Image (spheres, coloured by chain):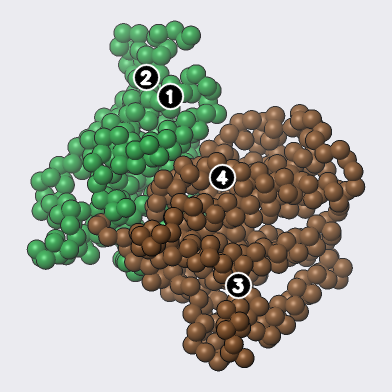
Amino acid sequence: MMDRFGAAAEGIAGDRRRLALAAVGVALLAIVPFTTTAYITEIVFTGLVFAMLGISWNVLAGYAGQVSLGHAAFFGTGAFVSAWLTTPSRAGLPELIPLGSPAAVAIVSLLGGALAAGLLALATGPIMFRLTGHYFAIGTLALAAIIQLVLLDQRRFSGGSTGYYINGSIGADAMYLLALVVTVGMLVAAYLVIESRWGLAMRAIHGDEGAASSLGVNPLRYKMYAFVISSLMAGLTGAIYAQFTLYVNPESTLDVVWMIDTLVVVILGGMGTMLGPVIGAGLFLALDTGLRAVAGGLATTIEGLLIILFIVFVPSGLYGLVERRYLSDDEETETPPSDVEESRSEGA
Amino acid sequence: MPPTELVLQILVNGLLLGGIYAVAALGLSLVFGIMDIVNLAHGHMLMLGAYVAILLFAAAGITPLIGMFVAMALLFVLGMAIQVLVLDRVVDEGIEQPIIVLFGLALVLQSLGRIVLGSDARSAEVGISGQSLEIGPVLFSFPRTVTFVVSVALILATWAFLRYTTTGRAIRATAQNRDAARYMGIDTDRIYVITLGIGTALAGAAGALLSMLFPITPFVGWSYLLKAFAVVVLGGVGSIAGTLVGGLVLGVSENLGTLYLGGGFRDIISFTIFLLVLVVRPQGLFGTGGGDGE
């Protein structure tokens, strides 16, 4: 089994056992809307949203090493643009999509949301990447805050702090299934990117930007690739979320809370690992639902504490823990691209 | 065009507010300059300080000017505890771990604030609120003037501490060269603990002062973090004089911007200034680069 091809394809489709597990998992998720209540479907849908956000942020932070704190902005942009596309009247915009089939409307609105977030990343990336490390983190936090404040201020387009309801075209069950398909698609896309030459360059920049640069890798270019891909994914996730909940609100849709949730998901699951965000999303969902039932308002406090505890004691996340113990049966080669080895930059 | 008196008044208000912004930024700047860590929970520590002052005032009628010292003491201890219990363990692991840990800490403080005090805006309505001093055409609001004077005193005290005390000198030595300081017999781990303590104590002081002027909610942390960081960027990391100038610049530009663009733009203005300066001149308008280590 140890041919080169198999070794190279480790990760999501690395071996049959994992592929079978994944297929069963996806199948189980696919029947949720038809076998459970709408309430449970919504909870599982939220889990898919967390998984998508986690996968998206992980490409940028976990692999390319750029800790952005402005992810909520791209999620919110996707949500709002998709809302404007399906329900332009609420924002005083002209009808842009000639209302054809409902599926076409849904797809155009989702792609529009993703594209808008990608364009936002394309426009702001060159500015943001003049910053590194702490400056980048806090710069992206400021960018997200500005976008949220501007939308809050422009009540005509955003509904102000009350937000507004939008027209759905294909129904909640269909949107749920679409979310599942997109989640799997994002996982595959992230895998393909990370395993490609682009991904190699991103990880090299993460390891040591100076060294990568001296070896001929253009850091800005690959950071931009990571930023735009990550933002496209976040925008698509936001659009899906808006089309499922049929409600957008600049206060909730663009809030830093989305950033916090994303962070919890990736940190619990395992930063810089392919399946980490998926595992983290499941864990976070169970935790969040369970904690709210048990601990009520303290749930968020406990989640914050978990972030701290995981970073300090389990920096490779649950995936790293499980993989080391159970999954690396045949070879020692299964070391996930670790972010722990990265050393502090010189000259402090 | 607004009349000259109004513009003058706005300028004065902005300058008086800028003093608190400078105190809020000073702790952040110290920690960044000395430890090379941006305390993402700084704004939330400020919020905590404000709540200490508000609660003391509500429960026992203690003026925030006294409550400020209680807030500083509590936050000094909290800061030291955080350094010992958490930051010490991740600070050598690279840049991502401290960022994420402090982000998590901010989340904890925000949610605890909401549990203990609810989401409603609160402030310490001191008796002097309405009074003011008239000089020429301009009113110097009493709370604003008092908090400004206290702010400047705090900044001078911090400066004197760093300049004239043994611990202060050790802190500066550590900031300049951690390894060399260690070879000279300075316990740099202890210095880090004290530095984070001072940084958070200053956040607490700024919060207590702000509670006299503005309503505070558990959610103001992010906003004040970004404002404080904007001041740090304006003034240069680790520069005390720069911090004061940066605070005043931010206070004035916020108030002028609000006058011309409307109240909804207050934060948009300061964050935009922040981003512009950050991008054009990351070492700060007045700074020499400090210990940002990038």
Calculate the distance from the C-alpha at mark 4 to the C-alpha at mark 1. 32 Å
Q: In this view, does B58 lie to the left or right of A159?
A: left
Q: Which chain carries label 3?
A: A
Q: In this view, does B56 lie to the left or right of B159?
A: right
- Picture quadrant where residue B283 is located: top left
* Residues at marks 4 and 1 touching, judged by CB atoms closer than 8 Å: no
Badge 4 amino acid: Leu
Q: Mark 1 lies on which chain?
A: B
* Pair 4/3: label in front: 4
* Pair 4/2: label in front: 4
Q: In this view, does B181 lie to the left or right of A220?
A: left
Calculate the distance from the C-alpha at mark 3 to the C-alpha at mark 2. 54 Å
Query: What kind of element bears circle 3?
Result: loop
Residue B255 is labelled as 1
Chain in green in the render: B
Badge 2 amino acid: Leu
Calculate the distance from the C-alpha at mark 4 to the C-alpha at mark 2. 38 Å
Residue under label 4, please give it: A122
* Residues at marks 2 and 1 touching, judged by CB atoms closer than 8 Å: yes
Query: What kind of element bears circle 2?
Result: helix
Residue under the point 48% across and 63% down: A201
Q: In this view, does A309 lie above or below A113?
A: below
- Residue A276: x and y, percent? 57, 71
Residue A275 is labelled as 3
Q: Mark 2 lies on which chain?
A: B
